[in-house]
Amino acid sequence: MTWASWTTVGIHARPGTVHTVEGRDLNGDVTIHTTWSEKQADVTVQYTGSADWFTMVGSPVPCFSEEDSRSFHQAVVEAVRSGEDAERELQRLFERQQ
């Protein structure tokens, strides 16, 4: 089995931007982690330094290569960093992968 993972720490998420399947909206200093295996990427998020991880709404997504999943991780990070349009951009990213 092939797998890879990426973690980006210290991203500032505005309120209402990062939604989780567990029903939590995270804002402030967050860490985003993507794990790729079995041709899909699982994206999780936590408050930086916390022990609890949450699955981002829309995850997992199909990613047929390690390179695609790395690019997807970076796109998610950049979307969260973007500020005002982050929620819309995240929704577009996750829907495009489906």
Image (cartoon, rainbow, N blue to C red):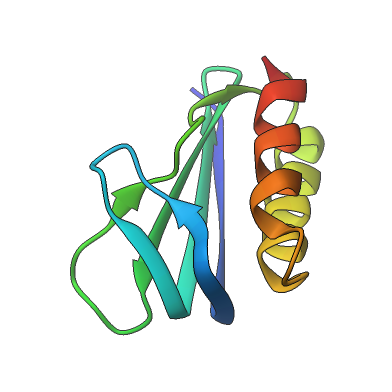
**Depth check, front residue: 90 or 65:** 90
Q: Is residue 98 above or below residue 74?
A: above
Name the residue at the left extreme: 51
Identify the residue at image location x=76%, y=59%.
85
Identify the residue at image location x=81%, y=46%.
71
Q: Position of residue 41 (x, y in %)?
A: 56, 32
Q: Is residue 28 above or below residue 35?
A: below
Q: Is residue 27 left or right of residue 80?
A: left
Q: Position of residue 8 (x, y in %)?
A: 58, 71
Instruction: Answer whether residue 31 is visible to the viewer in this image.
Output: yes
Q: Quadrant of residue 6?
A: bottom right
Q: Is residue 46 above or below residue 54?
A: below
Identify the residue at image location x=23%, y=78%.
50
Identify the residue at image location x=58%, y=79%.
11
Q: Is residue 46 left or right of residue 22?
A: right
Q: Is residue 57 above or below residue 25?
A: above
Q: Position of residue 19 (x, y in %)?
A: 43, 49
Q: Quadrant of the C terminus?
A: top right
**Depth check, front residue: 91 or 37:** 91
**Depth check, front residue: 36 or 83:** 83
Q: Quadrant of residue 77?
A: bottom right
Instruction: Answer whether residue 63 is visible to the viewer in this image.
Output: no
Q: Position of residue 52 (x, y in %)?
A: 19, 64
